[in-house]
Amino acid sequence: MSSLVVLGTTEQGLMYAIMVLGVYLTFRILNYADLTVDGSFTLGAATAATLITSGYNPWLATGVAFILGSLAGCFTGILHTKFKITPLLSGILTMTALYSINLRVMGKANISLLRERTIFSDFESLPYMQEYGVLILALLAVIIIGFFVYLFLETEFGLALRATGDNELMIRSLGVNTDLMKITGLALSNGLVAFAGSFVAQNQLFADISMGIGMIIIGLASVIIGEVLVGTRTIARAVLAVLCGGVIYRGIIAIVLQLGLVATDLKLVTALIVILALITPQLRSKFSLPIKNV
Amino acid sequence: MLNVQNLVKIFNKGSVNEKTALDNVSFNLNKGEFVTIIGSNGAGKSSFLNAIAGNFPTDSGTVIISDKNVTNLPQYERAKYISRVYQDPMSGTAATMTIEENLVMALRRGEKRRLKLAIRNKDKDFFRQELRKLGLGLEERLTTKVSLLSGGQRQALTLLMATFKEPELLLLDEHTAALDPKTAEKVLQLTCDVTKESHLTTLMITHNLDQALNVGDRTIMMHEGRIILDIQGEQRKNATINDLLKMFENASGTHFHTDRVLFS
């Protein structure tokens, strides 16, 4: 692999890692498989691209992407908690609705950002940032967001959020409104996913209506890969694990592409990784192998 | 302290599975009183505790705790007054979180959860001191995940979490029934110690008739969603298990039947 491919993969991996962190918040912390992600990733990209091409400040556009993603998460959360729709269906409903909304936002199926001002073009114009600007900005974002998510999960509120995913009965009897916890968790998660979507769009210089398809599976695969390789003994470790998982997943994809895999088969490979990870515990117990404590 | 008036709860109302779980129950509990509740299967004991704790809305009647009408408050808002230990040792703690994290969540029972770091050093000292009282060595394992503890250890921890921030009302739902006899004895002893020390107002469901008469200072018996017997003082002191069964038969007109009752 050329150093250019390695650099590009790492940059992309870091941006996707932010999305993976969002998936981790719902999938592991809230124990909620949230399919909104497929729509909110595109929503972030669509929002940023539309605002930028309309002449708005790209940093503002990125912030708005986060907020709109959060709103999408809120919507899923309200469907589930207030109207008792199952988690899976709530996510699918929002995702489906978002497809039309994203088309409305963009006005067409894709938007090019060529020669537009983006957060990366801004950052690269700073001194010494010409060569590695994208990498450094993505790395900064990952470190700052990872650190704050970790801190958040150690606060009183964060503990209540984690307990909601672990033992809802218990934390409710300790006086926590678990509906509010779920809505907040979903909002934060989808905010991060949309934020990552806006980064990816500004890096690849286009937004496309189909760029979010399969994102939830990529997120799950990355969470699982990170957990297995880095471990989850403490919250700090788990956050680090999922961030690494996001980067490592991109690395694996880059390698299999270099080995000659057709790009259209990628989703199949990703699904297989997740299936393998999900059935491993059962296969272990079936063949009575000791279950590794990860 | 606790005042329940004409409480009615009907499950699956209007369907063939309609079941009256609470049939016009009225009950008054004084501050500091420890009441044991017995009754056959499906008598409405757990529904009674659930209705007080607010797990479900009731059909009619009122629940007043410390002069505050809580009938229409959701469960999480009643948590300010009530803490609870369930039968299943797994349900009182969050398994994937550490001992200290579980403790600090219980310490904030009924309070607003803020965006500030949950555990401070002074909390840790307090937790160690409280855990030492359990005599299980947990004070050295603050950062151990609860999933690594035994059922008995988890139940003892749950009891501590339910009592160290003194609740107005403590609800115990057969909290020793799922433990082995030795651990059950220990958890019961802890229960007696802590309720006596802090004069906690307590409602305890039990299937052990001996326990029902010897623990606490008042016993009520439930049958088909009603309280059919309420004994205390001399009458209770002199009662034997046989008396209790006879009283049940007289009051209900049926035999005391349950597959889980313990006579010893």
Image: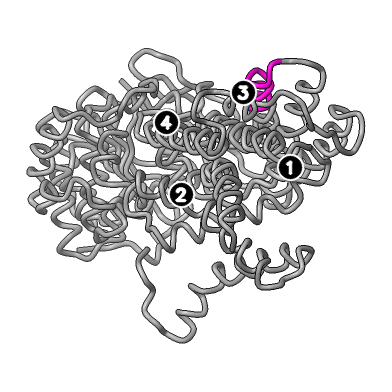
* Residue picked out by circle 4: A148
Q: Residue at (65%, 27%) from the top-left corner? A: A121
Q: Which residue extends farthest top? A: B67
Q: CA distance from mark 3 to mark 4?
A: 24 Å
- For residue A113, above or below residue A211: above
Residue mark closest to the camera, 3 vs 1: 3
* Residue picked out by circle 1: B14
Tell me whether the residue at label 2 lies in contact with that at label 1, contact meaning CB atoms closer than 8 angstroms.
Answer: no
Residue neighbourhood size for the residue with mark 3, other residues' Cα within 10 Å, grouped as few (<14), some (14–19), many (≥20): few
- Res. B158 image quadrant: top left
Name the chain under label 3: A
> Which region of the structure is painted magenta?
A57-67
Our reading of the magenta stretch's main secondary structure is: helix
Residue mark closest to the camera, 1 vs 4: 4
Residue mark closest to the camera, 2 vs 3: 3
Name the chain under label 4: A
What x and y, as percent, mark residue A75? 70, 31
